[in-house]
Image: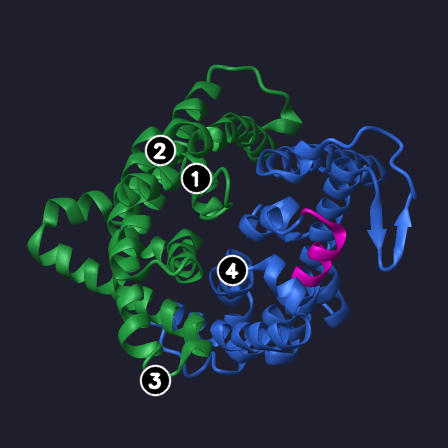
Chain colours: A blue, B green
Amino acid sequence: MNKRSLIGEFTKGLIEENATFKAAIGLCPTLAVTTSLVNGFWMGVAVVFVLTFSNVFVSILRKVTPDQIRIPVFVILIATPVVIVELVMRAYLPAMYQILGIFVSLIVVNCIVIARAEAFAYKNSPLRAAFDGLGVGAGFMIDLMLIGAVREFLGTGTLTVGSMVLPSKPLFEPMSVMLTPPGGFITLGVLMAVLNIAFQRAAAKRAKTVS
Amino acid sequence: MQFISILLAGVLTSNFIFMQYLGLCAFVGLSEQFETAIGMSGAVIFVMTFASTVAAAFEQFILVPFGLEYLRTIAYILVIAAFVQLVEIFLKKTAPSLYKALGIYLPLITTNCAVLGAAMLNVKNQYGILWGTVNGLAGALGWSLAIVIFAGIRERWKFMNIPEVLKGFPLALISTGLMSLGFLGFSGLFKTILK
């Protein structure tokens, strides 16, 4: 197996092994917190932090972890950064903590984090694991922000980025259903289908240039 | 009365899948066949009900008296993991046929966010042990209802001509969305009928 460069470990998480659109794991927070771009961003930040640290911890302890009980060990190693995120968020971003609610604590059982621990960090060095965690986390953050942006724009007619509101007035009657659970499922389903088309086109193009 | 309203809320108006987005990975992953969906439902109902009890008891007798609420996430996940392991061993010895039926689904439940989610929601809503258990049962029943209906729909896809790009997850999510739209209709239930 030829090893990737560290940058390669980072970038593969963005598209090639994208958690939401390629592997379709970690769907609960993907849908639950993405009613706006900002919510998606902060949830993404939390996941990047947890994923990077849990990957590093798992990787450091990979030689002393018995194979049979590795999943419980992973869960504890993941829970530690989650509690840190929870406490920091509650102290410095109380409003966001209220919005994200139990989904911050539920990062513990997020399939993405456990999948990266099992599939990558358990077999690789801490440095590689850190870059992998950063990459997959960043990919997930982009997914959350993308879904959040689509839902916020369709659901409220505007898009809030920092203190800017774009466009200042809704251009169409807002579809409030996009902010409810059904809207979340349908948005993600349609986005996934659209990206599937894009991936297929890209693959077909690559096949053409090779041959 | 509270019993009925918690039960109905869990199954219909705040269904774990359709309204609260809990346990989606298992929902999408294990609904391809009707039998697997039934097996997983059995395991989830069993574990979620009793895990809620155990977690609520843990909260009341250990976390609160010692002022350890900030460790809740770690404590709960350990309690649930230990409980699932215990159930597995217990069923293996006492009810081998049930163990065989639930078999591979039991270990999967530790990482099913619906179980931890139910325990967390119990704390958030301050349900205590008794109502926490009822809420766990209600959530599990709602989850099972959703996955069983969905598995039924998915079995029909085999005979359909589905566009290539929609196959698998995209169509699964869109259909879930449409089902969820239907369940949104129950949200007036409490305002009009029960109160």
Q: Chain of mark 4?
A: A
Residue designated by label 3: B66
Eye-nearest disc, 2 or 3: 3
Residue designated by label 2: B145
Eye-nearest disc, 1 or 2: 1
**SS under mark 2:** helix
Which residue occupies 29% across, 54% down?
B131
Q: Are marks 4 and 1 on the same chain?
A: no
Q: Are marks 2 and 3 on the same chain?
A: yes
Whether pointer 4 and pointer 2 mark residues with C-beta atoms closer than 8 Å, the reply is no
| Mark 3 and mark 1: Cα distance apart in space | 34 Å
Q: Residue A209 versus residue B131: which sits nearer the camera?
A: B131
Please rate how many residues cluster around mark 4, counting C-alpha atoms within 10 Å: few if below 14, some from 14 to 19, many from 20: some
Residue designated by label 1: B15
Please rate how many residues cluster around mark 3, counting C-alpha atoms within 10 Å: few if below 14, some from 14 to 19, many from 20: few
Q: Chain of mark 1?
A: B
